[in-house]
Image (cartoon, coloured by chain):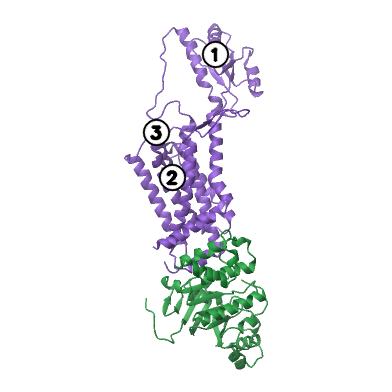
Chain colours: A green, B purple
Amino acid sequence: MTVTPTPPAPAVEAIALRKDFGPIHAVDGIDMALTPGRIYGLLGPNGSGKTTLIRLLAGLASATSGKARVLGVDMPSRPNLARIGYMTQADGIYPELSVWENLSFFAALYGQTDKAEMRRTLQLVELDGRQGTPAQDLSGGMRRRLSMACALAHHPAVIFLDEPTVGVDPALRVQFWNHFHRLAADGATLVVSSHVMDEADRCDELLFIRDGHVLAQGTPAELRKRAGTENLESAFLQFAGESGGPAASGPTAKETAR
Amino acid sequence: MNPLRVAAVFRRIVAQFRRDPRSLALLFVAPLAIIALLGWVLSSAQATTARVAVVDESGGPAGTIVASRLQSALDGQPGIALDRSVADDATARQMLKDKKLDLVVILPADFTVQNRKIELLTLGLNPTGEASVIPAVQAALIGALADSAGAMLPTIERQTVYGSPDATQLDSLAPVVVGFFAYFFVFILTGISFLRERIGGTLERLLATPVTRAEIVLGYSLGFGFFATLQVAIVMAFVLGRLAIPALGPVPAFAIGLGVRTAGNPLIAYLLVLVLGLGAVSLGIFLSTFARTELQILQFIPIVIVPQGLLGGFFWPIDQLPSLLQPIARILPVTYAIDGLRQVMIAGADLSSPQVLLDLGVLVGIAAFFVVLAAGTIRREVA
């Protein structure tokens, strides 16, 4: 495994990345290069290929053609997974296990055995008072926080979060985003898929995704300016219209989880 | 292979079990309850008295003599109650139907000294059970006829190479039951447990960590192997041991455990069951691929468990199966476990016995085969 040491090397890269499921091109030739220490938002309607793209980048699926690289290593690469955090759309925690048992299980698989570190992670998601509570007795928002803690306990350099704020109340959502910014400030690269527009504005950079293509990439301000629109939703529809598809399939604020 | 990750999977399965009292009960209480019931039924099946009548339809002198000798031979035999009031065939049949008689000995109309054919008539609802009284009747018949012939008849004493001729059905079933329960419960619990991983999104999450498929299967095997070990230890102790509790006040004396004798080393028997159980873990993981819900795991019972119970030598020896079914029986793991367990527990074989080594070897092979299959169903692009 060779890790490119040159400083501005992208943390996450896709080169002509493509994934077909039979006749469906879920990811249809995506090129991108994500700079370390920034938060990237993947925006697009359901079925646009966001989750498939994240699974390719996180090494859970292999590409039909093209390349996915994380921290300079071609994915899928099992050893490289220790440097990646992945929060799935489903909570992906064991309901009968306690908060602490869930966290320490996933941490151990990532090679993190430092209990002090795990406690710090629990403090970050404000579950430190609930260590012994079985996950099934937690509220939906708490389960979401536990799920996030399980993806972060090993201090990954690259973090993929697939719809992390679905089912999370607005106050907690703000906390989540503050936390994401702290992680980015510490040098982590975050890739967050979302469809909520006010969330999109909190990303450093956005990638509009539809039908397995990147329609546009840039900071929220840039994208609004290029589209000549007041808000990101209109900007998305503007870019979607340019690409020739039906504009009605843009993301909406009411989309629910898959 | 990273032992820390295997240990993490193992610890997680143990922790999940600890918090799941129903599965614990299924694993530890259910087999004991079923075996206790089985032991109770088999060891103290009521010694019933068969009600027997002798009917002479012949009317000839030979018939009259034989009938009366037969009656006096049967009268007072243990387990037989002779009814002398029945006069003819039609009455006897009606009394059988009314459950007032269990067996009728008929000397048919053409019975003579030359033609000594005798008929035994039973109801026919439960041919096997009704036949259990026939040996006593036959013995009485031989006695009655021998008297008339004045001959000296030899007596027969039965012996067996292994165990004793007095061995009950329980003695031959007990070793089998131990193995079968381990297989059944381990299969069901692993299948459901791994299905939950697949549908609950935790497997996706596991595969996003550096854990390998082999580490997952091994961790599962250790986790369920641990509980299978406990289960087998408890079940074996129950089957082999017998703790008599003396009467205390109003509570009558009773015994815990079946007190089945084992001729061989229980540790070897345990080893056989453990390898069988490890195969069941991987089979459960493998088959969970083909299920979407927990109910669908249970739907595998008629496919996986029942044929093994019918063909594996539980009730009938493999050699007595129809020739078409014998090859099927010989690919079932339970077949080898049952054979090995009987070799050890009844025949007293140990690890120097080629038969036991063959059984153990086949079980290891089957377990290894399903480990590979199970790892293959945990889909990931990287190994």
Q: Residue at x 41, y 18 (%)?
A: B156
Q: Earlier in the sequence, mark 1 or mark 3?
A: 1
Q: Earlier in the sequence, mark 3 or mark 2?
A: 3
Residue that badge 2 annotates: B273
**Looking at the image, residue A85 lies above or below residue A229:** above
Q: Residue at x 50, y 37 (%)?
A: B238
Q: Position of residue B5 (x, y in %)?
A: 44, 62
Nearer to us of marks 2 and 1 is 2
Q: Secondary structure at mark 1?
A: helix
- The kind of residue on which mark 3 rests is Ala
Discs 2, 1 touching: Cβ within 8 Å: no
Determine the CA span between mark 1 and mark 3. 39 Å
In front of the other: A101 or A197: A101
Nearer to us of marks 1 and 3 is 3
On what subunit does the disc labeled 2 rest? B
Residue that badge 3 annotates: B263
In front of the other: A113 or A62: A113
- The kind of residue on which mark 1 rests is Leu
Discs 1, 3 touching: Cβ within 8 Å: no
- The kind of residue on which mark 2 rests is Val
**Looking at the image, residue A232 lies above or below residue B155:** below
Q: Can the viewer see residue B315 in this picture?
A: no
Q: Quadrant of the N terminus of chain A?
A: bottom left
> Which mark is on residue B74?
1
Number of marks? 3
